[in-house]
Amino acid sequence: MAILDKVKSPIKKLMPKPVLGGYHYAWAFLAAVRYGFPARKLKVIGVTGTNGKSTTIELIAAILKEAGYRVALSSSIKFEIAGETRKNSSNNSMPGRFALQKLLAQAAQKKCDYAIVEVTSEGITQHRHRFIGFTGAVFTNLTPEHIESHGGFDNYRKAKQKLFAVAKGFHVINRDDENANYFLGFKAKKKYCYGLCPAGSPSATGEKCETVCAADVRPVAGGTVFSVNGQQLETGLAGLFNVYNALAAVSLAMAEGIGLDVCRKALARVRSVPGRMEKVSVSPLVFVDYAFTPNALKKVYAAVRKDFLAGSGKLICLLGACGNGRDKWKRPILGQIAGQYCDKIILADEDPWGEDPRKIIGMVKEGVIKSGFDARNLYVIPDRRRAVAKAVSLVGNNDAIVLTGKGSEAWIRFEHGKKIPWDEKKAVLEELAKAKR
C-alpha cells in the first residue's frame, strides 16, 4: 500500500483539477460498492466546522447512548464502534474513502443505529462524503483555515456547505456564527438553530429554524452550567465554546426526539474530552488543548483567564505552528494572540513536516514580539519535551499552564516521513512528577 501511495502521489499532482475531482469521485463510488453501501443501514450524522467538531461528536455520542442507541463514531480523536474504541493515530481527521466505508460497514454489522462522522473541508473536496447518504448535518462555526489549499475563504466555506446539500433529514446550525446564513439556505425536513439567549431572528433570509438557546451560563468547579427551556444542564467541560458544542448536541437530540432529561444525564457524565481543553493537573493547573487556529487559541486563553486565574496568577503558554506549508499566514497571528493573553511563552515544535522548524517558530515569534510582549518572558525551545519541562519549571502558585497545538495527537511529524511518538498529557504528568521529587 505504501508503494502504491508513492506512485499515486506524483500522478495526482499532474492531474488537472476536473480530472482529479473525477478520480476522487470514482474512488468514493468504488469504496461504497466494495462495502455494500453500508450507510443505508445506519443514520449517519456529519459534523463540520472549523473548531469543536470532535468535542461535539463526543457529546452527541453520549446523548445517543444515554437514549439507548448503539453508536459508531469517527473523529480526529478516535474511532468507536458499539463501545469498542481505538485511537485515531492517522493524519486524517476524516478517514479516506475505503477506511470510512469499512468503518460504516463494521458499524452496520454491529447493529449500530447511528454513525457520527467528523467531516472536513479537505475530505469533502476529495468526495469522501459521497455515497453515504447523511441523515443530518451539524455546523459548529467557521473561521479562516486551510485557506491556501482551498484558494480562499469563500472556497473553504463552499466546501463545508456541500455536507448540507446532501444531508436531507435535519440541519443543526450555530446561529451566533456570522456564517450561519450560508448554511441555512439548504433544504432539510427539520432545522435547529442554537446559540446564547436571548434568541434573536435566526436568519436574515427568513428561513424557519427551531431555536435552542442557553441561558444563565456560568462556570462552576466541575465545569459549566447553563439552562435550556428551563432545564438546567451541566457539563464537565470548561469554556463558553464548550457550551456551544453542548448546544449543538442538545439540538441534534431534539431533532431526533430525545428529551432534555436524557441530555442532562448524558452531559453530566462527560467530564473531559482527550486533548480538548483537557485539565490534566489541578495543582498546578494544566490544560492540554488541540487549538491550532487563531480563533480557537483566543477562546482557550480567554476561558482560562476568565474562569481559572485569580489575583496575581500567571498564564504560561506553550505553542507552535504546523509545517508542511500549511496556512503560513496564521503563524504570526498565533504569536500575537499569545502575546496578548500570556505572561510567559514557550515556543516549540508542533509538526514541522518538511519545513525548517526554526523558520516556523521564527514566524510565530515575530507575532509575539509585534504584540509588545516582554521578550524576557519568551523562551524558544524547539524540542517539545524540553519545552514542556520548561513550562513546568516556570509555574508558581495560582498560575496555569496551557499547552496547545497537539491535543491528543500520537506523533510529532518531521520530513521524509519521520515521526516520533508523542503524548502531551503523559509528558506533562511525567515532568510534574520530576519537579516534585
Image (cartoon, rainbow, N blue to C red):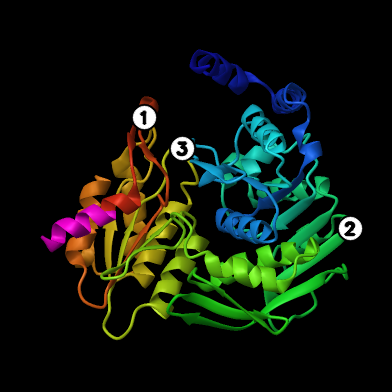
In magenta stretch: residue 430: yes
Residue 30 relative to residue 77: left or right = right
Residue sitting at x 42%, y 49%? 408
How much space separates mark 1 and mark 2, taking CA atoms? 48 Å
Foreground mark, 1 or 2, reads 2
| Position above or below: 86 against 274 | above
How much space separates mark 3 and mark 1, taking CA atoms? 18 Å
Give the residue type that dot 2 points to.
Lys
How much space separates mark 2 and mark 3, taking CA atoms? 36 Å
Part of the protein shown in magenta: 428-437
Residue 180 relative to residue 61: left or right = right
Quadrant for residue 173, please give it: bottom right
Q: Is residue 284 visible?
A: yes
Q: Which mark is residue 89?
A: 3
Give whichever of discs 1 and 2 has the lower sequence position. 2
Q: Secondary structure at mark 3?
A: loop
